[in-house]
Image: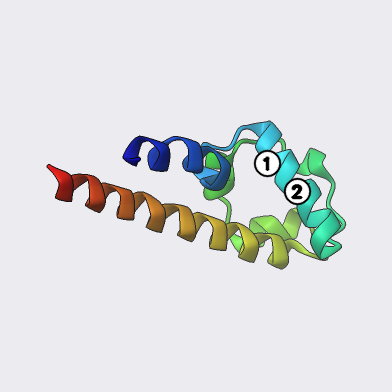
């Protein structure tokens, strides 16, 4: 169970381990669901690189919608960190 928590769920939800393809998929989903007009070529990077970006960096790349992208990304990142912390605590409690 802990292994699933750290590997399977992490791959889907943890932006820190996203590939360039995952970033592109996220941008496409944001384009469809939030009507953000984003040029994916401005985000040729993996999730680790996105983690280093500030709100200003997002809005520089997407003047209309950068704040929406940044907020959504930060929500996903916070959830992933919280899940990783939870999994660590549960694993520690079992030993």
Closest to the observer: 27 or 3? 3
Closest to the observer: 4 or 55? 4
Q: Quick check: can you spot residue 63?
A: no
- Residue 83 sits above or below residue 34 on the image: above
Count of numbered marks? 2
Disc marking residue 23: 1
Q: Position of residue 83 (x, y in %)?
A: 40, 54
Colouring scheme applied when the structure was drawn: rainbow
Q: Position of residue 68 (x, y in %)?
A: 71, 66
**Mark 2 Cα shell of 10 Å, populated few (<14), some (14-19), many (≥20):** some
Q: Position of residue 26 (x, y in %)?
A: 71, 47
Residue ID for mark 2: 27
- In the figure, is residue 26 to the left or right of 86? right
Confirm or deny contact between disc 2 and disc 1 (CB under 8 A): yes
- Residue 61 sits above or below residue 65 on the image: above
Residue under the image location 23 percent in, 53 percent down: 89
What kind of element bears circle 2? helix
Q: Quick check: can you spot residue 45?
A: yes
**Mark 1 Cα shell of 10 Å, populated few (<14), some (14-19), many (≥20):** many
Residue under the image location 80 percent in, 47 percent down: 28
What kind of element bears circle 1? helix
Residue under the image location 87 percent in, 57 percent down: 37
| Quarter containing the C terminus | top left
In terms of image quadrants, where is residue 20? top right
| Quarter containing the N terminus | top left
- In the figure, is residue 80 to the left or right of 84? right
């Amino acid at each position: 169970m802990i292994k699933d928590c750290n590997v399977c769920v992490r791959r889907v939800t943890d932006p820190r381990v996203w590939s360039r393809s995952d970033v592109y998929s996220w941008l496409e989903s944001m384009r469809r669901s939030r009507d953000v007009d984003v040029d994916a070529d401005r985000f040729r990077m993996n999730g680790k690189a996105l983690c280093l970006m500030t709100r200003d960096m997002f809005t520089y790349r997407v003047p209309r919608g950068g704040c929406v992208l940044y907020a959504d990304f930060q929500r996903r990142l916070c959830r992933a960190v919280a899940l990783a912390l939870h999994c660590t605590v549960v694993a520690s409690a079992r030993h």
